[in-house]
Amino acid sequence: MPRTLSQKAAGALASSRLLRRGQTLYAENQNNWYLPLSRADKLKSGLWLILHDYSRGVFPPQFLDQQKAYQDEKNYRFSIPGITAAEVSRNNMTKPFWRGNSLQMYLAHFCRIVRCLEGAGVQPPAKVLELGCGGGWASEFLATIGYDVCGTTISEDDITDAHRRVKSLEARGLPSTLKFAASPMESVHTVVPPGTFDAVFIYEALHHAFDWRASLHSSYACLKPGGWMLVCNEPNVLHTYISYRVARLTNTHEIGFSKKELIAELRQAGFRNISSSGPKFHWWFSPHWLLAQK
Ligand SMILES: C[S@@+](CC[C@H](N)C(=O)[O-])C[C@H]1O[C@@H](n2cnc3c(N)ncnc32)[C@H](O)[C@@H]1O
């Protein structure tokens, strides 16, 4: 029930004719992940949902229960509307070779990660740790180049998928330096050998962590002295709003960061030589790319 005046106003707006289309689209989207939505449709359904949830006191989302947050992330493949877990697994195995603009974007991002590593002097066969690796595509690509890679993520099912990539390298006769392990990134230093990695990178996953601050501290513990932390394509502040519809549909954690808070926490964790290679403009929209040294 709306409590404050602003919640009452949001509730009234959400149930007005103005946003009826948004409500209908969201209801359809709840049954069909692939519902074709134009930008305007996404805006309407997202706006309706935010106002609706704000009026009920559940927006902005609060993540207070670690075990629930972990379980929700692990359940991701079982919670996407209209998609089976087997399809999610197939998607994991084909990533980044997805249709549309995704392929170009993921490959460009991968090249950027490699450039960041090389720019920091981290060359194969250096030891690299990935956090939130999903189905492990970026870890596999780095291992193909010759890095000694360990991919980690919270979902054991993702790790089962990712292990097939190790077999794929072996089948191609490439020396298998690729490993995967299930671990929350908040405590990854308790699962992998701490103080042994030349670089830790996280790509589009820090914003899913229950406690992103603890994740940066745990990354620090994994690195050798002088090792490098790469924060890659993590969303800017408006992501909390822009991705709220997706977060609600999949029951996962979608938040955005300001560059200021990311840099402050990296410093707090003990990192130095912190630099940003983006964004220069569009402060609230463009994702972050940060490099920091232990
Ligand atoms: C958007 S996906 C990105 C996956 C991967 N980086 C990629 O490019 O395919 C976010 C990933 O973070 C993982 N994740 C969520 N919370 C986590 C946590 N607390 N610790 C480790 N991984 C987590 C999810 O299971 C998922 O694999």
Image (cartoon, rainbow, N blue to C red):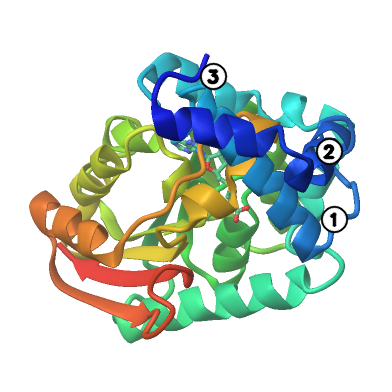
Quadrant housing residue 252: top right
Disc 3 marks a residue whose amino acid type is: Gln
Name the residue rendered at 29%, 71% in the picture: 291
Q: Earlier in the sequence, mark 1 or mark 2?
A: 2
Residue 154 shows up from this direction: no
Residue that badge 1 annotates: 37
Q: Earlier in the sequence, mark 1 or mark 3?
A: 1
Disc 1 marks a residue whose amino acid type is: Leu
Asked if disc 1 and disc 3 are in contact, CB closer than 8 Å, the reply is no
Q: Callout 2 environment at 10 Å: few (<14), some (14 to 19), or many (20+)? A: many
Q: Position of residue 40 (x, y in %)?
A: 77, 62
Secondary element at image label 3: helix
Secondary element at image label 2: helix
Residue that badge 3 annotates: 71
Q: Is residue 130 above or below residue 122?
A: above
Residues at marks 1 and 3, CA–CA distance in whole angstroms: 29 Å
Asked if disc 1 and disc 2 are in contact, CB closer than 8 Å, the reply is yes
**173 relative to 241 in the view: left or right:** right
**258 relative to 250 in the view: left or right:** left
Q: Nearer the viewer, residue 226 or 106?
A: 106
Residues at marks 3 and 2, CA–CA distance in whole angstroms: 23 Å
Q: Callout 1 environment at 10 Å: few (<14), some (14 to 19), or many (20+)? A: few
Name the residue rendered at 17%, 53% in the picture: 265
Disc 2 marks a residue whose amino acid type is: Asn
Q: Position of residue 274 (x, y in %)?
A: 19, 72
Residue that badge 2 annotates: 29
Q: Nearer the viewer, residue 283 or 192?
A: 283
Residue 242 shows up from this direction: yes
Asked if disc 3 and disc 2 are in contact, CB closer than 8 Å, the reply is no
Q: Earlier in the sequence, mark 3 or mark 2?
A: 2
Secondary element at image label 1: loop
